[in-house]
Image (cartoon, rainbow, N blue to C red):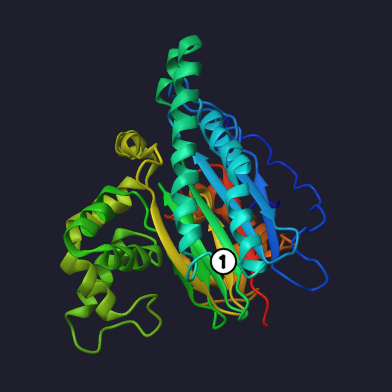
Amino acid sequence: MPEKPGSQRPEGSISELPTLKPPPPNPFERKGEGFALSKVSVGKYEFISPEPGRSTANQDALWENADRDGTAVTVFVGDGIGGYAGGEIASSTVRSTIARENKKFEAIQQKRNRGEGVGPGLQAEMKAMRAVLATANEDLELARHMHAEDSPALKGMGTMGTLVRMVKMKDGRSEAVIGHYGDTRAMVLYPDGHLETVTLDAHPEFLRIKNTHGEEAALHVQSVLDRLDTHREFQHLLECSFEEGKWPENAPVTKEDIAFVEQVLGNVHVHAYFEYRNFSHKAFAREDKRRTRRFEEPDIRHVLIPAGGKLILTSDGIHDNLTTQEMEAILADGDGVFVDPMLMMYAAQGKTPAERLSEAAKARALFHAYSPRSKGPDDLTAVVVEIPER
């Protein structure tokens, strides 16, 4: 990856970036049927943290499997909780459980394909999703107990994750059941280029809004903040919203969006949110994540994916380093409003949509001064499931 002129890597903290291996044959493309999938899982940067016990292993976990007939796919993206030893063990434990329990989803789809009754929509998949994640939680608890006997530091290991079961229905529609916990994400890219996040991060501010105003309100606040770089940008737009004719023509959000966030979250809490993302507040972040390392109460959602759209799964190393409009521009393979051409240059090094997202996030993470949004080196995992036009 070329160096950005005038930028330097923190000495002794980041090793050379790993070289991406050529993508394996795509099991999702069979005679033009089913789904197409592109993915990339990049190992952790060799970031030497001053915190004792910080693991440098890749704490992301990725597993995907297409049914033999190409009518369904299961994808899991996990991310071990940083700051605790054993995050890679926790995420790989859940991945192994899901790989083993995927037979529950396959059995449902086989019955559906044979015309046997499995209930309306994806209700059977939603029930199976709860069962699979409950088993994953049990296995994680067992692994935590077993490893802690030899290494007490592993007692606090945990992971977050997003599990998706996507089914191509007989009428041609693509529907997905999404089980989610933590701050990995699932997003839908609509054919018009609009990217919508459909999972809610386990952030204390968002959870507070969810409990007070409902999940849709929390998701809307999250989506607005995802399009901003800093609290200063929010503050500027908030001030503009009070003066007629002062609203910037190419603002990444609307005046109504800013007013809504101010109403349900407030300027002070917006400032806290952006500070929460910063390096200096990782200890605060870990304390909140301490309560999110289990899959006991996952969020289960049913989502319709339009023909020609895409389902995007990412770990926070991707979406915390990129704004939503940057991701939209990268996935569209073109320039976009508020998208720095230098970032697009890095993204262009990737061959698949998932690789382009990963290359851009790596550049943003590497050059701390490149953008105030940079959260620094982290594991990166991106999965892009493309939905056929017909």
Q: Nearer the viewer, residue 190 or 258?
A: 190
Q: Is residue 73 left or right of residue 259?
A: right
Q: Vertically, is 120 above or below 270?
A: below
Give how far across and how far down residue 240 sits, in percent.
23, 78
Q: Tell me the residue at 35%/76% (across/down).
A: 253
Q: Amino acid at mark 1?
A: Leu
Q: Tell me the residue at 19%/64% (across/down).
A: 213
Tag 1 secondary structure: strand
Q: Locate residue 353: give its quadrant.
A: bottom right
Give how far across and how far down residue 134 sits, in percent.
44, 41
Query: How many numbered dots are placed on residues in this image?
Result: 1
Give how far across and how far down residue 333 sits, in percent.
65, 73
Q: Is residue 330 left or right of residue 325?
A: right
> Which image quadrant: the C terminus?
bottom right
Q: Is residue 175 left or right of residue 266?
A: right
**Is disc 1 surrounded by few (<14), some (14 to 19) or many (20+) residues within 10 Å?**
many
Give how far across and how far down residue 307 sits, in percent.
60, 80
For this orientation, the residue located farthest to the top is: 150
Q: Is residue 17 left or right of residue 309?
A: right
Q: Is residue 320 visible?
A: no
Q: Tell me the residue at 58%/40% (across/down).
A: 95
In the picture of the structure, the residue carrying the numbered disc 1 is 311
Q: Vertically, is 171 above or below 233?
A: below
Q: Vertically, is 158 above or below 361?
A: above
For this orientation, the residue located farthest to the front is: 116
Q: Tell me the residue at 54%/83% (across/down).
A: 192
